[in-house]
Amino acid sequence: MNDTSSEPHHGPHDGPPDAEARRRTLDSGVASKDCDAEPIHIPGGIQPHGYLLALSDDLCIVQASDNLASLTNAPVEALLDQPVDALLGADGAKRIAHAATHIALDDAPLYVGAIESTQQQRFDVTMHRHDGTLIVEMESAAATGEAFASMYPLVRTFARGLQDAGTVQELAELAVREGRAITRFGHVMLYSFDEEGRSHVLAEDRDTDYASFLHQFFPASDIPRQARALYLKNRIRLVANVNYTPARLVPPINPLTGQPTDLTYATLRSFSPVHLEYMRNMNTHASMSVSIVVLGKLWGLISCHDHDARLVPFNTRVAVEHLGHMLSLQIEAKEERAEGEYLAGLRCTMGRLIGGMGEHENFVAGLRAVPNDVLNFARSAGAAIVMNDQITLMGATPDQDTVRDLTHWLAENTTGVWATDSLAREWPPAKAHIDKACGVLAVPVSQIFCNYLLWFRPELMQPIKWAGEPLKITNAEGASAPRTNFLPWLETVRGHSALWRPGELEIAQELRGALLNIVLRRAEERAELATELARANKELEAFSYSVSHDLRAPLRHIAGYGDLLREMEGDRMSKKSRRFLNNMLDSARFAGTLVDDLLTFSQMGRAALRPAPVDLGQIVRALVQEFEERHRRGKSSG
């Protein structure tokens, strides 16, 4: 976790018994590498309240848990290479053979039923196939009846309440209440995982002698990455007695694979010694966890704890697992509905933005006209429009120079719609503007130019109450050790804005597509107008050429005949007539010059325009001279 400042925890911090031999550092919320690397899926043994067999395809026992010796009163090695009916009888072997042949068992444990062993003991038997091995698990069954017979009475109240729960929080409270009623554990919690792997306790139901963890956080290192991966694959796990001695698999290497048997999907799988020590540190002697899976991802867990050892009957576990499935579906439905409603609201806002842009000559003017919708679109405190190096700011934003520098960085380092809740972590200059631009959503509106729509969110200082100081404890050799203290401990997280929701990024992508369409449409309109203007210019050029050509002939005739008239009759004409004739000839020649200039102007579209200096004084002097001559002529004629 970045940029954190911590307040004192509530109550004394009890150090670990061997504190002098341990190093303790603040946990960033990411599981330690050595915990992540622990091969918890191949523990080499199981919990001793049940038995396990590994079978070949011909249903011969190739591996068995060593506690079977107490059941058969013979060394477990005596079972190896024997057909499975040597332990489960002909009827049990027949049922297992049928399941292995006709039912898909890959990574999907199947309840085969209650089977009586050759020792006249009744077992609930499940089996699955994984890594090329058939794995059979056996647990003592109830005296009579099948495991599913009492499942409905256990979950019917919960099933009824699902329809009445209006929110995820209400579902969580219902789940812990009914989960505790079914399992009889002393403390039942429901927590969800966040993006960093931390778990947040949403609801709990407990006896008064259990510490409350309601609304507290557990660091990600408490449940390492590979443990969360197993929770996604195997939906229910039980530790019946934290002080159990594992029943080892014999032989330790599976003859079929040449590797330790992968117990990912085995209910009886033995747990990591680190996890068991963690349970003891919490004064928990029995625990059961049920996965909540939403849209294929581990959303959270129902976690049951008890101060005493507790062997949960098989039928109760089936009921709780069913409860977890129903809860997962309900959470998924409610979250999808809430997200759908939120997306619908965003699309309405986007519709108003697009409508506003369509009413103006360019989209920047359209966005300026609806500043509230611009800010509400991304639930932001500030926004910026950067178009052709012109910047428009709305609400609380950094200054224009900072926004301009940010867009240049975005253009060089990001593609498409991009968002972060900690801009300073990606772009250090943002540290000076954390109160306005801690988080940013960037939407490029050009694939060539540095044009962007930006939304800014301020820093959101978030107080977190941890279930114990989030320390990573290591021993002298550097190996991880479990935490020992779970007293509430407060921490204030800084340097982050409110997270950008996936729906916001999705709608931002849609807005970008709409903007690009608007820009493309305007470009097409301008191209069409340019084509029309080019056509009109060509027509004007042709018309100008025709007019100039048609006017040249009569003007030349006027000038020619005028010259002839002046030459032939000039001596016999009065001064006034000669003046009129001269004026007519000057006007005709001037009109010819204008026609030539018109033709030249009509052809300027094909020639470069070059500015040239003009002597305005010369023009003024020419006009003055002309009027002076006219004035003198008028006086002489008068």
Image (spheres, grey):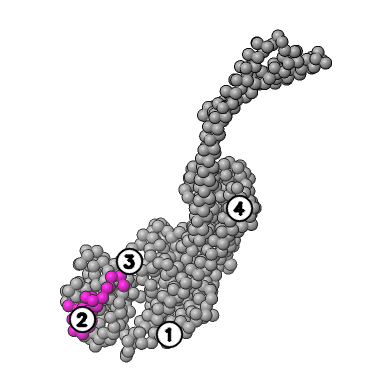
* Residue 299, percent from left and from top: 45, 68
Residue at label 1? 154
Residue at label 4? 359
- Label located before the other in sequence (1 or 2): 2
Query: Which amino acid type corresponds to the residue marked 4 in the rendered image?
Result: Glu
The residue drawn where x is 56% and y is 50% is 453
Q: Which stretch appears magenta? A: 83-108
Query: Which amino acid type corresponds to the residue marked 2 in the rendered image?
Result: Ala
Of residues 491 and 557, the one nearer the viewer is 557
**Residue 278 forms part of the magenta stretch:** no
The residue drawn where x is 60% and y is 20% is 557
* Residue 457, percent from left and from top: 59, 55
SS label for mark 1: helix
SS label for mark 3: loop
Instruction: Assess disc 2: are there few (<14), some (14-19) or many (≥20) residues with their C-alpha within 10 Å of its C-alpha.
Output: some
SS label for mark 2: helix
- Label located before the other in sequence (4 or 2): 2
Quadrant housing residue 279:
bottom left
* Residue 513, percent from left and from top: 49, 53
Query: Which amino acid type corresponds to the residue marked 1 in the rendered image?
Result: Leu
State how far apart marks 3 and 2 are (Cα).
27 Å
Query: Which amino acid type corresponds to the residue marked 3 in the rendered image?
Result: His
Q: Relative to 316, say whether 298 is above or below.
A: above
Q: Is residue 21 visible?
A: no
SS label for mark 4: loop
Residue at label 2? 93
Residue at label 3? 41
The residue drawn where x is 27% and y is 69% is 130
Of residues 540 and 523, the one nearer the viewer is 540
- Label located before the other in sequence (4 or 1): 1
